Image (cartoon, rainbow, N blue to C red):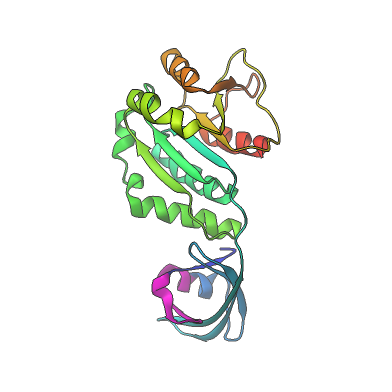
């Protein structure tokens, strides 16, 4: 935890917070914090700064906070992601939050197993928890937005063209396509398929909506590897 993330419910006064649960245990066991210590802190969807530990016991910690610094800027990136395997999904959420992705849209695909949509990791509280872990790692306070779209064709035909307006649409897919660009300076919507890639029908529909196919070379990457590699290359 590189940033102590504070929620509105933690505040007992304008500059005082009380912490319990996971964050309290992290202060005790990992930070081995002592009264008087100063820690990096930030308010969810708000400013960052410092928190000074006023009191600490097994039940709660009280801290005085001074928040006066803006969080790091988000990447101008919407990630259109075919629903990954559940265990991989948790890590991808954390990576996306750490890297500063603005928006994640989870999309169905022919090669996405139906059971993936039944995972408890898709529950809102589970999604938020994994995003929070990514924010804590990166020292950020602003959660990415997450949308779930289980119907491929209606989403691509009805919603995707408007979402792509003013953005560079890139479709990551192995094949004889141009290399993925580097260090772009414009908003982007990046589409990454499931294990095994998009099927030809899906590629055709995404291209018709305004995406340009690109590739990363001959090696076939796992989804979580492709996500971080492509984001790092683009931004």
Q: Nearer the viewer, residue 168 or 170?
A: 168
Image quadrant in which you'd find residue 19: bottom left
Q: Nearer the viewer, residue 65 or 25?
A: 65
Q: Identify whether 73 is placed above or below 156.
A: below
Magenta residue span: 8-25
Please identify the quadrant where the N terminus is shown: bottom right
Which part of the image, by quadrant, shows the C terminus? top right
Dividing the picture into quadrants, the one containing residue 229 is top right
View extreme (right): residue: 183
Give percent across and percent down for residue 29. 52, 72
- Can residue 20 be spotted in the picture? no
Q: Nearer the viewer, residue 26 or 79?
A: 79
Residue 13 image point, x, y percent: 44, 83
Given residues 51 and 189, the one toward you in this image is: 189
Residue 220 in the image: above or below residue 23: above
Q: How many marks?
A: 0
Residue 72: x %, y % from top left: 62, 57
Would you say residue 12 sits in the magenta stretch? Answer: yes
Q: Is residue 107 magenta?
A: no
Q: Residue at x 52, y 65 (%)?
A: 46
Give the residue displayed 39% in from the left and 22% down from the top: 111
Note whether residue 109 is visible.
yes
């Amino acid at each position: 935890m590189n940033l102590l993330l504070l929620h509105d419910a933690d505040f007992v006064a304008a500059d005082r917070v009380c912490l319990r649960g996971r964050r309290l245990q992290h202060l005790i066991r990992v930070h081995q914090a002592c009264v008087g210590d100063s820690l990096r802190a930030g308010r969810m969807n708000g400013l960052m700064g410092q928190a000074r530990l006023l009191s600490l016991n097994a039940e709660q910690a009280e801290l005085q906070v001074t928040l006066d610094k803006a969080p790091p800027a988000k990447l101008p990136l919407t990630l259109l992601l075919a629903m990954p395997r559940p265990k991989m999904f948790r890590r991808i959420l954390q990576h996306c939050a750490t890297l500063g992705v603005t928006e994640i849209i989870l999309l169905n695909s022919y090669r996405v197993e139906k059971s993936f949509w039944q995972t408890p990791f898709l529950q809102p509280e589970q999604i938020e928890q994994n995003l929070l872990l990514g924010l804590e790692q990166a020292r950020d306070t602003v959660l990415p937005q997450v949308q779930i779209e289980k119907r491929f064709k209606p989403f691509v035909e009805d919603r995707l063209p408007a979402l792509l307006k003013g953005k560079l649409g890139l479709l990551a897919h192995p094949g004889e396509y141009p290399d993925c660009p580097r260090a772009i300076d414009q908003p982007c919507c990046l589409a990454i398929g499931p294990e095994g890639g998009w099927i030809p029908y899906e590629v055709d529909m995404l291209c018709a909506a305004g995406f340009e196919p690109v590739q990363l070379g001959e090696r076939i990457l796992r989804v979580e590897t492709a996500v971080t590699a492509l984001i790092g290359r683009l931004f």
